[in-house]
Image (cartoon, helix red, strand yellow):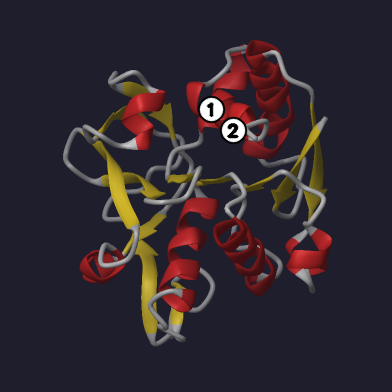
Amino acid sequence: MSRVALIGDFDPDVVAHRAIPPALDLAAKQSGVSLAWDWVGTHTITDAPRQLAGHAGIWCVPGSPYRCMEGALAAIRFARETNRPFLGTCGGFQHALIEIARDVLGIAGAGHAETDATAPALVITPLACSLVEQQGEVAFLPGSHLRSIFDGQVTRERYHCNYGLNLDYRTRLEATDLRFTGFDANGQIRAMELLGHPFFIGTLFQPERYAIAGRSHPLIEAFVRQLHEP
């Protein structure tokens, strides 16, 4: 049985947090695999390599601002550097961009406007239009991992966020192995992935919300299957 670390500060009032366990259960049943998961509070992460070594994959979940940004970033770095399957949704997507900015590009002051609006390098800033309880179509670039997961199809996804990438940092981030591969109908960034990593995907949308209607989601199924790859 594979175990997933759910990186975030569980709150039963957060819709995504209630949706994630049934989303994983649906994906596991659909994929025919055995799966378990543990909620790992960001404030409890003091030694990510030791604490997360027993987990086959990492999902950095919605619900930011996290109690401890450094804990979330340490978990993301652990997944990236050890080639563990990683999924970051909403706040997880945002913090994956910050982790890469800090630890790959060396931008020590990379930060999130929601957490510290005075940070010297605000990689994550307010969206021009709020996406709280919004939904819309997302398309993926040809040749991308996400395009393959969705069989080349456009998907309709739900959101609950006010923050996204500060486009001033897009070119610098794309100078790494990071690629922005998911876009809405207006060309706004909605997903990313890392080249050369078996599975490192972040989405601004919340695929776990499919589970509210009892539906399994292709991206979560792909994440779960990857946990069982040799």
Q: In this view, does 154 lie to the left or right of 194?
A: left
- Residue 222's disc is 1
Mark 2 Cα-neighbour bin, 10 Å: few <14, some 14–19, many ≥20? some
> Mark 2: which secondary structure?
helix
| Residue 54 coordinates in the image, percent (x, y) | 82, 50
Q: Is residue 50 above or below residue 226?
A: below
Q: In this view, does 96 lie to the left or right of 128?
A: right
Q: State the residue in front, 99 or 145.
A: 145
Residue drawn at x 69%, y 39% as measured from the top left: 17
46 above or below 186?
below
Q: How far apart are marks 1 and 2 (CA)?
A: 6 Å
Q: Which amino acid does the dot numbered 1 rest on? A: Ala
x and y, in percent, of residue 66 in the image: 65, 63
The quarter of the picture where residue 169 lies is bottom left
Circle 2 sits on which residue? 226
Task: Give, as a three-letter code, the residue at label 2.
Answer: Gln
